[in-house]
Structures are given as C-alpha cells and as structure tokens.
Amino acid sequence: MKLWNRHTGILVPLLAVIALTLWPVLTGKPANRETAFTLLKAVALASSLNILLGYTGYVSFGHIVFYGFGGYVGIYLLTERGWSLWMALLAGGVASGILAFLLGSAILRLRGAYFALATIGVNEAMRAFINNFELFGGPTGITLNFSVYKTYGGAAQALQTSFFIGAGLALFALILSYLVRSSKFGLGLLAIRENEDAAEVMGVTAPKAKTWAYVFSAIVPGMVGVLFFFKNGNVEPHDAFPLHASIELLVMVMLGGQGTVFGPILGALAYQGMRGFLVTSPIFKDIQLSVSGVLLLLIVLFIPAGAIGWLRHRMPLFRRVLA
Amino acid sequence: MTIILSLQGVSKRFGGLQALTNVTFDLPQGQILGLIGPNGAGKTTLFNAINGVFPPEEGRIIFRDKDVTRAKPSQHAHLGMARTHQIVQPLNELSVRENVMVGACFGHENQDLSNAAKIADEVLEFVGLAPRANQLAGSLNVAQKKRLEMARALAARPYLLLLDEVLAGLNPSEIDNMVQTVLKIREQGVTIIMIEHVMKAVMNVSDRIIVLDYGQQIAEGSPEAIAKDEKVIEAYLGDPKLAEQLLEEE
C-alpha cells in the first residue's frame, strides 16, 4: 500500500495503456487491434518527446528523425544481416540513442527558437542523406522479404506479435517517462526548463543533463520505428522522416499537457481519435492537417499548460493522481 | 585564519567598457564582507566573475585552494559556492519546496531526493517560508522570492555565500528580518560576501567592507573607517556634508 501511495502518479497512465492493450484482445477483432496499435504508437512517441519538450523545455520539430533512423537501422539489420526482430529492435533503439547523443552534444548548445530550427534541419538533412545512401536502398528504401515473417509464425501471427511488442514499448515509454519525472535527474531537467542560467548556478550540469534527456527521448522512437516498418513490410525515406508527423507529436504533447506523465498519453489518444474521425469525414478528409494546425494555435493561445496542466491548476486535489 | 577566497588582479572588460580593474582581496573564512559602491560600479559583475558566469580576462580566483578562474557556474556550485540573484530567478512552475530541493540536490553535498526534501523543509523553516512550501514559486511576492533565493542558496550548505542585494525592495520590518537571517547564517560558519545599498544594514553586519567605483577598489576597511573615508563619500554623493545629513536621517 505504501508503495502505491508514493507512486499514485503512474496509476492512471498505466491503466490507460493496459486498457488499450486489452481492448482488441477482448473484442478479438483485427480492425480494433490495428486501431489500438496506432494509438499505442502515438502514446509511445508522444511520451518520449515529452521528456525533451515537457520536462526539459526544448522544442524539437524534428523528433521523428529518431523514429526513421532507428527504423532504417533495424530493418537493414533484419533483412540484410539476418538479425532477429528482438535484436533489431534493440539495435534501432541504441542507434537512435547514439544519434541523439552526438546531435545533442552539438545542437543543444542552442536555445529556444534556434534549437527548434536546428531540429528541422537535422530531420531534412537525414532524409536527404538516406535518399542517397545506397546501403539503405537510396530513394526506394528497403523491402522486407515476405519469408521473414515465417520465423514469427506467418504474417498473421507476426501482426499479432507486433501488436504486443507495440504495447510493451508504450508501457516502456510510460515507465521511462515516469522514472525520469520522479528522479533527481528529472528535477534537474525541470530546473533547466524553468531557468537554465539559474539552474547552472545551483549546480545543475546543464549540457550533460540536456544531452541525456535527448538520448532518453530518442530510444523508444527508434524501437517503435523498427517495429512499425517491420509490420509495414518496407521502409522508404519519405515514410521514415515525415516532418508533419513531428508536428503532430507536438500537438499531442501540448494538447494533453506537457511536462506531465499522463498528459502526452491523453493527448495522443485524443488527437488520434480526432484524426481518425477527420480523415474519414467527407468534409475534413483533405484538410485534417489544417485542423491540427488550428488546434495547436488554440492550445498555445488559451491553454498553454494542456488539459492535464489545466486540471492540475484548477483542482489541486487531483495533483497526486495526475502526475 | 584560513583564506577561503582569494582574488588576484581580477579584470573584466565588456567591449570598450572596463567593468573591473585589478580587483584584489583575500577573504578569511567566517567573515562577512560587504561590497558597496554606486550603481554601475561593477559589484554584480564581480559576483559574476567570482562564480563563473562571466569569467575574467585577467587575474586569478582561488576558492578553497583551487584555481576556479575559468570554471563554469555549475562547477562552482559543486565546490561549495552559492549565490542569490539581484533580479530574482525563481523556477516559477515548480513548488517552493522543489526550488529549494534543486539547491540541495546539485550543490557540493549532492544529496538524493529524500534528503533534499528534508533539508528543504529545514531551510524553509529557517527563512520563514515553511507555510508556502507547496505553493508554486511564481505565486510568491517579491520579499518572499528574495527569501526563496536565499533558501535555495542555503540548501546547498555552501562554504561561501554570495548575496546580491537581498534587502533591495524590502520594507523596514522585512529588512530587519533579513538582517537577522544573515547573522544567523554567519553563526553557522558560512562565509558571506554581500552586495548592498541599504547602508545601515551593511554597516551593521559586515566585518569588512570593500568599495567599488568604476570597477576599481577605491577603499577597503572596517565599516567605521569606510563611513569616514573621503573618497567613498565623494564617489557616492560628491558632497561630504550631504552624506552626514543622510546618515542621520537613516
């Protein structure tokens, strides 16, 4: 009981992810499973981005670069080197982590808008590079040999397995986010977000802390990339590094509440739900991105703290539960 | 008597402006050193040079037998130096307790979170902010934010504390409280350098005073000697008679 009292903040997010995982299992419909997979993927990516955006206060417009790069590395190892899915997933995460470490050491010296611009540059540069990188198939990318799925019990079973791995990754992202939030390292990140100069005067080693925040926010997206493109059957530059997906992630995090554990999860679910409705509606199907643009504008103008931030502000009673 | 901080010929320029010229002094452990001077004399710049925000171009700074001339602010904190800011720098969206915990966690004692929370509560009690511990730092008023600056610096349990105008903007009863707090801190063995414009307070608490004007040390000595120093009075007021008059009014 004491343990739960100390960690009430993780309860609601944990239940949300578990419910999302059980929903297709209980209903048994493959269509529900695919919807749930998309939602869990968004939860994992948004929770990861939150470590950088919400806790550290650095806006990254190119976070999807880690998803694409990790995905490419994993799929390459899977098809060309014959690695197992598990090892490929791990390698994708590690590759993205290393990329974040190297990038972070360079561009995290920038602050505010300059950092945000640099992240766009990084994403576009990576796309251009992969487009011309023959080892990764250049502009046509890498296609998985269908026989790969046999190792995992055939295509249908592979989809099922992918779903559970996806749920696992969402859970991992959530726990990582919570651990960072409730650690001393996380307190240092929050201090950097609020006032980087003051934090340094108090002894927070900002360059090191920021770089590690970047690394922690990159690992899960790298793994999600591998899983998604494994399930997808191929990976191409234009699917791997879509700039608009980065912006959609920002909307999710800000909609739910940046800097909270549950916020990005709620935001991811709400945004994906809305997107699902918009792309199938005859009126909005071509302008769904405009709607998310307007949404971002409204959030920034009226509820900059996001839904959870707003609730925490209004109802101090919920603060323990809505960490 | 151990020397905790030693400045040797410290100079700093910003473009064409010579902000500090050849500042040299030794600070024995346990003393309160008052740093005074007219606006723009370079007092805050001297603090920024001492704790690494703007390292000096010339000269050396020795803190506890280590050369820290080129060290970063975070390294100074790890060595046991803490400061408050003239313009308060609260971490607005964090609670008052969390603000103070940052000081305890990342200072030279490198406390873990649960110890830091205990230290934060003690320090908040000490500076009189305990009832506000769970409030967001952004919601405090100016006097409380000044106390918060002080609490954060104290939570690091520093050897040397740099106080930059902690009395500015406070009313007379708040000033009295703050002066008592400063004296209590000294009793705990902390060495203090304080920049202050409130003359009565700085004259009362300082063991020694250094006067800066246009980046130069124009006088140094006990509070009584400084109050009578012609050069100091001229730097401040241009007219010694007016000075006496003002001191009487206080």
Image: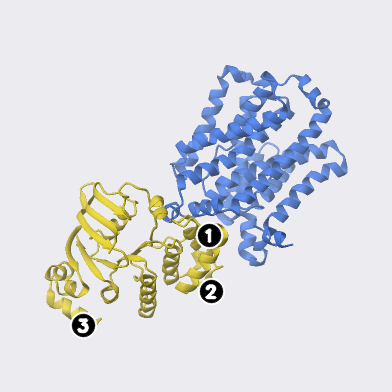
Chain colours: A blue, B yellow
Q: Secondary structure at mark 3?
A: helix
Q: Closer to us: mark 3 or mark 2?
A: 2
Q: Chain of mark 2?
A: B
The amino acid marked with disc number 3 is Glu
Of pointers 2 and 1, the one earlier in the residue sequence? 1
| Residue B248: mark | 3
Label number found at residue B93 = 1
Q: Amino acid at mark 1?
A: Glu
Residue B37, given in percent of the width and then of the height, sits at: 22, 65
Secondary structure under tag 1 reads: loop
- In the image, residue B211 sits, relative to residue A36, either above or below, namely below
Q: Position of residue A293 (x, y in %)?
A: 60, 44
| Quadrant that contains the C terminus of chain A | bottom right
Residue name at image x 63 percent, y 37 percent? A221
Q: Kindly give the residue lying farthest to the top in the view shown.
A: A134
Seen from the viewer's position, the closer of residues A20 and B209 is B209
Q: In which image quadrant can residue A233 be found?
A: top right
Residue that carries the numbered disc 2 in the rendered image = B131
- Mark 2–mark 1 distance (CA, rounded to whole Å): 18 Å
Q: Earlier in the sequence, mark 3 or mark 2?
A: 2
Q: Residue at x 21, y 56 (%)?
A: B23
Residue farthest to the front? B1
Q: Quadrant of residue A151?
A: top right
Q: Does B50 sit left or right of A243 as displayed? A: left
